[in-house]
Image: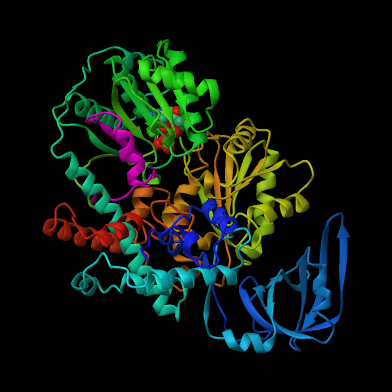
């Protein structure tokens, strides 16, 4: 079966299931195979309570002592069980599972797995530990079992069944990398990698699978970019802009600040691109808060003054709206009578019609939006510039879609994941790069601290003290809801827990990527306006949100995020005049290296150049799948070696086969990596 076959063709996948899979972006067999586990459970030998570390996942063989108790509160219930193993006692708590009392009966023994925690008085407990009877456990003992992000109606066993079917269907798929390239880079086959990432036999095979899949993510990204360039050929700037106008001057004069030297330098480079002979293709990179936006606005205004339309594409609704509001305020302040238009998925009905007609007849000088900007129905009068913000968040197809709207359009891409120049060239080829290495003056560096999760109380006290001063706080959890992994904090339960432990006066709200656009907007608005104190969220807030009054960000399960992602998350704070703080809470026995790096460095360029020396198995179990959509497993900073190799390999393959005119199967494989 071809891997672009719809998932419905798989045994057991009916209309209901495929609807739920679609929510996760899974439409084809290839998509399903790329639905990598969010982590793995290693079924280790059970240990005794006495020898198990508090604050780390552990496996215990426990006997239930006495009969459990259940409290009901409305539709909710909490059940407690006391259990022991002769070396100590542990209290087990389950939420909304009153029926467990029939199984966890006095005297019964089971293997329990979960996070071992301890109260202030030294009583050990586990919340929602997973359990299995002894004979069942002996069958999985010593194996690695994948855990998947939650898909409604599809339990773990069923998911594994689907994946086994998908692998069977994909058997015989072609490998995009010829054998000699695989050998050169010590990579296993693609099919083998996909099999092992879902059904690992041991840690080493899992590492090999990850290496191959990360390699492919970079490979596909680079090939996509290079192909795009080849199709363009030599690009000539057919509409060089005049840069002696006055609009940008007016805007600059009305700003409450002066451009930094680096900003001024980058602005000169952008102007010289836009007025030059070759079409602009420039990357503007700088840490969050380095002041990239103003340069985008200047470029858009220059474009408008030259009688052409400029488009700014942001990766999220919220960010697009923030840009729209920011630009509108600047225009008002400077008295420039420009007419920007907002176009996102949330702009509907008449407003949408009007936006589209103004884009088509040219009365919209500047268009700001999400990827809605490149949809079929959008017709530009004379598109003259495309700026993409946080461009790495878009797929290659989304980016080129907008460029296709106009012939030969100059492009400015902005990125807050600063990468060393050598990596930038690898990723983007001959793209020109402007870097903002320093933040505007007067900014205080964010203070960062990595704490073991057993010190969560300390973190909460600190947050409360900031809220008392009138500040706000972000809390980031790796999972959305219960069931995505027992050892990960999830937004739904976490918000409830926070409400229970913090005073009633603290206003807590939550945000996940799965909410509808208008719901997200409402939650963000409430936070931005200061009517929420704590915003609990997944990484959806990773990108560009600007709430200067937020001075603390607490990242739960920090060990589960990649270095570049943690750095991005930290950039949510430190945007105002007050000192800001970042707290990374980690579980497990040791502090991960990357947290150490983040504690000691605040500059993204510095961080990007740091090498992660030890890569403990911790990395394996915190496989991230919430990072940059372009990369499911890869982290730009941590996997830079593989990036170099993928680049070398793709360049060589393109030299031999410039159009990448591979057989059909290879093409399919490439486009769906
Ligand atoms: P990013 O690079 O993350 O997109 P922004 O463009 O949002 O950063 O800038 C962050 C903040 O810094 C904004 O509030 C902006 O007004 C401010 N800013 C930008 N340039 C300067 C400057 N030269 N001096 C002082 N503040 C600046
Ligand atoms: Mg920005």
Q: Position of residue 452 (x, y in %)?
A: 59, 64
Residue 236 among those drawn in magenta: no
Please identify the quarter of the rendering in which residue 204 is found. Answer: bottom left
Decide if residue 395 is on the left or right side of residue 52.
left
- Image quadrant where residue 308 sits: top left
* Left or right side of 245 for 316: right
Instruction: State the residue at coordinates (41%, 69%).
Output: 169
- Could you tell whether 374 is left or right of 235 in the image? right
Ligand 2, by image quadrant, is top left
Q: Position of residue 209 (x, y in %)?
A: 38, 72
Instruction: Give the x, y percent position of residue 252.
Output: 36, 19
- Horizontal placement of 448 versus 81: left or right? left
Query: Does residue 535 sit above or below 479 in this rendering?
Result: above
Total marks placed: 0
Q: Residue at x 19, y 23 (%)?
A: 275
Q: Is residue 408 magenta?
A: yes
Assign the N terminus to one quadrant of the image. bottom left
Residue 6 visible in the current orientation: yes
Q: How is the image coloured?
A: rainbow
Q: Range of the magenta residues?
A: 394-422
- The one of 229 and 672 positioned closer to us in this rendering: 672
Q: Is residue 220 above or below residue 389?
A: below
Residue 441 shows in this picture = no
Q: Position of residue 375 (x, y in %)?
A: 40, 34
Q: Quadrant of the C terminus?
A: bottom left
């Amino acid at each position: 079966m071809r891997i672009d076959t719809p998932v419905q063709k798989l045994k057991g996948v009916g209309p209901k299931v495929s609807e739920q899979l679609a929510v996760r972006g899974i439409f084809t067999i290839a998509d399903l195979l790329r639905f990598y586990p969010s982590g793995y459970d290693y079924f280790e030998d059970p240990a005794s309570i006495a020898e198990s570390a508090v604050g780390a996942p552990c496996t215990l063989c426990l006997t239930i002592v006495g009969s459990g108790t259940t409290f009901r509160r409305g539709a909710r219930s909490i059940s407690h069980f006391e259990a022991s193993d002769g070396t100590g006692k542990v209290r087990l708590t389950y939420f909304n599972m009153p029926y467990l009392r029939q199984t966890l009966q006095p005297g019964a023994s089971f293997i329990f797995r979960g996070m071992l925690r301890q109260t202030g008085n030294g009583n050990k407990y586990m919340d929602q530990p997973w359990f299995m009877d002894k004979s069942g456990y002996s069958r999985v003992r010593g194996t690695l079992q994948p855990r998947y992000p939650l898909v409604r109606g599809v339990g773990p066993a069923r998911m594994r069944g689907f994946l086994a079917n998908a692998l069977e269907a994909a058997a015989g798929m072609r490998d995009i990398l010829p054998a000699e390239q695989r050998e050169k880079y010590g990579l296993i086959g693609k099919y083998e990698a996909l099999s092992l990432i879902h059904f690992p036999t041991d840690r080493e095979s899992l590492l090999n699978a990850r290496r191959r899949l990360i390699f492919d993510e970079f490979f596909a990204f680079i090939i996509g970019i290079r192909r795009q360039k080849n199709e363009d050929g030599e690009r000539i700037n057919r509409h060089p802009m005049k840069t002696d106008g006055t609009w940008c001057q007016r805007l600059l004069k009305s700003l409450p600040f002066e451009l930094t030297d680096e900003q001024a330098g980058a602005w000169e480079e952008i102007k010289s691109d836009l007025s030059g002979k070759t079409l602009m293709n420039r990357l503007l990179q700088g840490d969050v808060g380095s002041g990239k936006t103003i340069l985008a606005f200047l470029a858009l205004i220059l474009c408008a003054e030259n009688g052409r339309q400029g488009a700014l594409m942001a990766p999220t609704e919220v960010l697009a709206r923030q840009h729209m509001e920011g630009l509108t305020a600047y225009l008002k302040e400077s008295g420039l009578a420009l007419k920007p238009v907002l176009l996102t998925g949330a702009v509907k009905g008449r407003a949408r019609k009007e936006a589209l007609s103004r884009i088509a007849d040219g009365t919209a000088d500047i268009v700001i939006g999400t990827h809605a900007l490149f949809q079929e129905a959008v017709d530009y009068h004379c598109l003259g510039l495309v700026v993409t913000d946080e461009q790495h968040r878009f797929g290659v197809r989304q980016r080129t879609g907008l460029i296709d709207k106009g012939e030969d359009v100059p492009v400015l891409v902005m990125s807050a994941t600063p990468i060393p120049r050598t990596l930038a060239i690898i990723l983007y080829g001959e793209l020109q790069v402007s870097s903002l290495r320093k933040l505007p003056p007067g900014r205080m560096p964010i203070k960062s601290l990595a704490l073991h999760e057993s010190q969560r109380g300390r973190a909460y006290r600190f947050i409360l003290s900031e809220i008392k001063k009138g500040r706000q706080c972000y809390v980031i959890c790796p999972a959305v809801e219960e069931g995505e992994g027992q050892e990960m904090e999830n937004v739904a339960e976490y918000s409830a827990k926070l409400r229970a432990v913090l005073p009633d006066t603290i206003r807590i709200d939550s945000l996940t990527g799965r909410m509808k656009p208008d719901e997200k907007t409402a939650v963000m608005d409430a936070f931005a306006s200061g009517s929420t104190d704590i915003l609990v969220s997944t990484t959806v807030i990773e990108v560009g949100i600007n709430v200067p009054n937020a001075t603390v960000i607490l990242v739960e399960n920090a060990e589960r995020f990649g270095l570049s992602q943690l750095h991005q998350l930290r950039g949510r704070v430190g945007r105002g005049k007050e000192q800001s703080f970042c707290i990374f809470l980690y579980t497990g026995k040791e502090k991960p290296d990357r947290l150490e790096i983040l504690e000691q460095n605040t500059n993204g360029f510095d961080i990007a150049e740091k090498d992660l020396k030890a890569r403990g198995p911790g990395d394996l179990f915190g496989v991230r799948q919430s990072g940059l959509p372009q990369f499911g497993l890869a982290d730009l900073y941590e996997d830079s070696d593989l990036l170099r190799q993928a680049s070398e390999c793709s360049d060589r393959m393109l030299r031999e086969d410039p159009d990448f005119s591979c057989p059909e199967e290879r093409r399919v494989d490439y486009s769906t990596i």
